[in-house]
Structures are given as C-alpha cells and as structure tokens.
Image (cartoon, grey):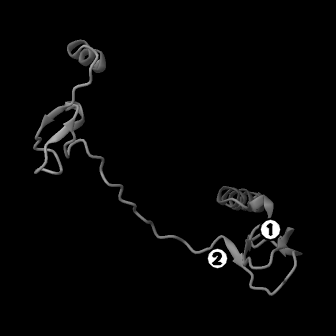
C-alpha cells in the first residue's frame, strides 16, 4: 500500500529521501533511503535474549557412567536400578561412549518411574 502511494506520487520512479535523522547511527552522514527505513528507534529494537541457565544436572543422575576399554560394540546385560524392579535389560556398549541408561525400558522416563513408585506402594499395601 505504501509502495502504491509512492509510485503514484513519483510516477513510478523510486525517489530516496536525503535527510539527516536523529535516529541514524552515523550522525555525521545524511541518510539515503526511503523515509520508512529510517524509523528504527530504540523502542523498535528487539530485546537481547538473556539466556538463563538453570542448574544443570550431571549425566550420572538419570544415567549410569560405565568406563570401559572395549574396542568393539559389545552387548551387556544390566539390572534396572529402580527400587522394586529387578528386570534385566540389554545395552550395546560402544567404544568411546561412557553414558548408558540406568533404568529398564519400562522406567526410562521420569513419569514412568514416579508412576511405578505410586502403583508399587498401592500394590504392597493392598
């Protein structure tokens, strides 16, 4: 719409404005461009994103660290670390990787572990 108004008044020719702006970053040189391009104030500037880092937990909280010297992919059997679950699960051990799951596939997520604790205590009480 603005472009249509400008082309009507200038008969199709693009005519940049040459005015010095108080919002221009280089104040000693005149602004060459469309007047709408010069409306860049501090109110229009995006706020710098402040990244707030929360306390990050270590990998050993929900995983187990297994330091090994295997040079080939090896399949190892572990027992679930969740209290009340004694299910065994297999994990492939890769060379150079030391972080592996601590819980079986039924209890991998936090929700599943909390749900197991709630239902496990109800079964024991009943």
Say which mark, if any, is on residue 60: 2
Could you tell me residue 65's position as x and y percent? Answer: 70, 80
Decide if residue 26 is on the left or right side of residue 114.
Answer: left
Q: Is residue 39 visible?
A: no
Q: Report the front residue among 55 and 8.
A: 8
Q: Is residue 90 above or below residue 27?
A: below
- Residue 57 placement: quadrant: bottom right
Give the quadrant of the N terminus: top left
Could you tell me residue 68's position as x and y percent? Answer: 79, 86
What's the residue at 65%, 60% (across, down)?
110
Say which mark, if any, is on residue 85: 1
Give the quadrant of the C terminus: bottom right
- Residue 37 placement: quadrant: top left
The nearer-to-camera label among 1 and 2 is 2
Asked which secondary structure carries label 2, the reply is: loop
Most distant residue in the bottom direction: 69
Q: Is residue 49 visible?
A: yes
Could you tell me residue 100's position as x and y percent? Answer: 74, 72
Q: Residues within 10 Å of mark 2 (few under 14, many from 20)?
A: few
């Amino acid at each position: 719409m603005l472009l249509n108004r400008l082309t009507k008044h200038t008969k199709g020719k693009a005519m940049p404005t040459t005015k010095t702006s108080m919002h221009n970053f280089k104040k000693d040189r005149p602004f060459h461009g469309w007047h709408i391009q010069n409306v860049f104030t501090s109110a229009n500037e995006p706020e710098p994103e402040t990244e707030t880092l929360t306390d990050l937990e270590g990998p050993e909280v929900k995983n187990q660290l297994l330091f090994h010297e295997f040079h080939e992919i090896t399949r190892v059997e572990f027992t679930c670390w969740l209290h009340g679950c004694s299910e065994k699960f297999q994990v492939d051990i890769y060379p150079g990787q030391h972080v592996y799951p601590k819980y079986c596939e039924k209890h991998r997520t936090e929700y599943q572990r909390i749900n197991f604790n709630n239902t496990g205590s109800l079964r024991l009480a009943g």
